[in-house]
Image: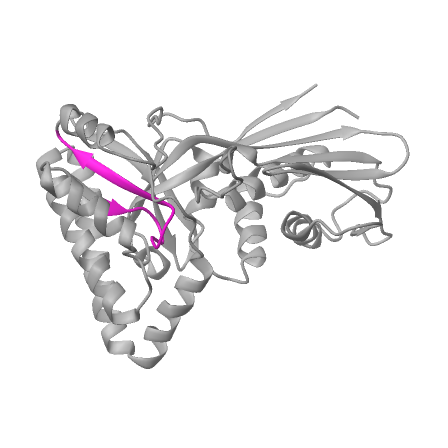
Amino acid sequence: MPSIAVSAPGKLVITGEYAVIDGASAIALAVNRRSRVSVSPTIGQSVLEVTTSGAERFPFTWQADGSLKFTDNDPAERGELLRVLLKQLVGRLPAALPDVVISIDSSEFYLAADGQKLGLGSSAAVCVSLTAALHALFGLPDDLQQLCYDVHREFQDGKGSGIDVATSLHGGVIRFQLDAMGPPKCEALSWPQGLYMLPVWTGHAASTGQMLQHLDGLRESSPAMYLNLIGELTQIAGCFQAVWQRQNVPELLELLVTYGFGLNRLDEAAAVGIYSAEHVDFQHRAAAIGAVYKPSGAGGGDFGLVFSDSSAKIEQFAADLDSAVMLPDWSPTVPGVELRTD
C-alpha cells in the first residue's frame, strides 16, 4: 500500500458572509496556511496522529462495519471528523481494512507562541485533506467534491454554506453560490488589477457556531426583518461579483463599504457580535487613511481585511499595527487540495 500525502488551504471570505447561507453569491480567497494529512501503512495497531499546537497519538482498531474504536483517549474534534467521514463511506469500504498511521497536522492554523486558533477555516481544510486522503487510499468512485461537502455539513450539524470547503478544494479566488437544484456553483476568478488587500488578525478567535445561533434567533423571531436584511446583503454581493469581473476597483471599494454597512445593520438587529471592538478599531484606522476595512467571514474576532487602490496606504496601515497578526504573503493563486503518493 502506498503512502498518501494531501494538503489543503484555509480561506478568507471577501464578500457574501451570512447572506451566502441563503443563496447569495460570495467571493473567497485561499490562503497560505494548509492542513496536511498523510496515511501510511504500519504493522500492528493503527494510530491517528493529531498535531495542532502540539502532537498527540491515538491508537485505534477498525471495527467490522468499517468504523473505528479508539483504544485509549479519544481525539475529540479530529476523531469525530474521521468518524463522520467513515459513516459516509459505509458499504463502500474494503472488507479488510489495513493497519495505518493517519496523521493530521493543522498547526499552521494556530499561533506557535500560545496555541491560539487563527480562524482561517481549519476544520474545512482538515475535512478536505482527510477526505481526499481516504478517497485515494480506498480508490473510491465517489465524487470527491460532493463527498467533502457531505462530510463537513454533517460534521457541522447541517450548519454553514460550504464556501470554506469549496475554497480548500479549488484554491485561488472563487465565486461560490448555493444552488437549490444541485451542488453549489463554483467559479474561478482573477484578482482585479490595482486592488490591494491586507488580511489582519484581531488577536482572538470567534465562535462561528454561536454567532449563527443568534442569526437563527432573528430568523425565527422577526422573519420579515431577517429577509429584508439578508436580501439587502444579497443584492450588494451580487453587484460586487459583477463589478469584480469588470475589475472596476473604485466601485469595488464603494461596494465593500456598503456591504460593511449592511453587516452592521444585521449585527445590530440580531446581536450577532460581528463588529467586535477590534474590528471597529481597525475600521476607524482604515477610514482615517482613506482605506476600507471589513470583517472577513463571521466576524466577532478572527480576521478582517483592509482594501485600497493604493499599495502605500496598505503599507501605512500595516506600519501602524501593534500586535495583530498579518498575512503579508497572501496570494490570489494559492493552490487548492494537492495529493501525492509515494
Image quarter in which the C terminus is found: top right
Quarter residue 10 falls in: top left
Which residue extends farthest top? 342
What's the image's color scheme?
Answer: one colour
Q: Is residue 15 magenta?
A: no
Which residue extends farthest bottom? 221
Q: Is residue 305 magenta?
A: yes
Residue 57 horizontal side relative to residue 269, left or right: right
Residue 294: percent from left, percent from top: 23, 47
The residue positioned 27% from the left and 40% from the top of the image is 305
The residue positioned 19% from the left and 46% from the top of the image is 283
Q: Which is nearer the eye, 238 or 140? A: 238
Q: Which is nearer the eye, 275 or 71? A: 275
The residue positioned 56% from the left and 53% from the top of the image is 150
Residue 100 appears anywhere in the view: yes
Image quarter in which the N terminus is found: top right
Q: Which is nearer the eye, 315 or 93? A: 315
The residue positioned 32% from the left and 61% from the top of the image is 273
Image mark count: 0
Residue 144 appears anywhere in the view: no
State the extent of the magenta-drawn residues as a range: 294-309
Residue 53: percent from left, percent from top: 59, 38
Tell me if residue 52 comes above or below residue 181 in the rendering. above
Residue 169: percent from left, percent from top: 48, 37
Which residue extends farthest right? 44
Tell me if residue 277 comes above or below residue 94 in the rendering. below
Quarter residue 187 falls in: top left
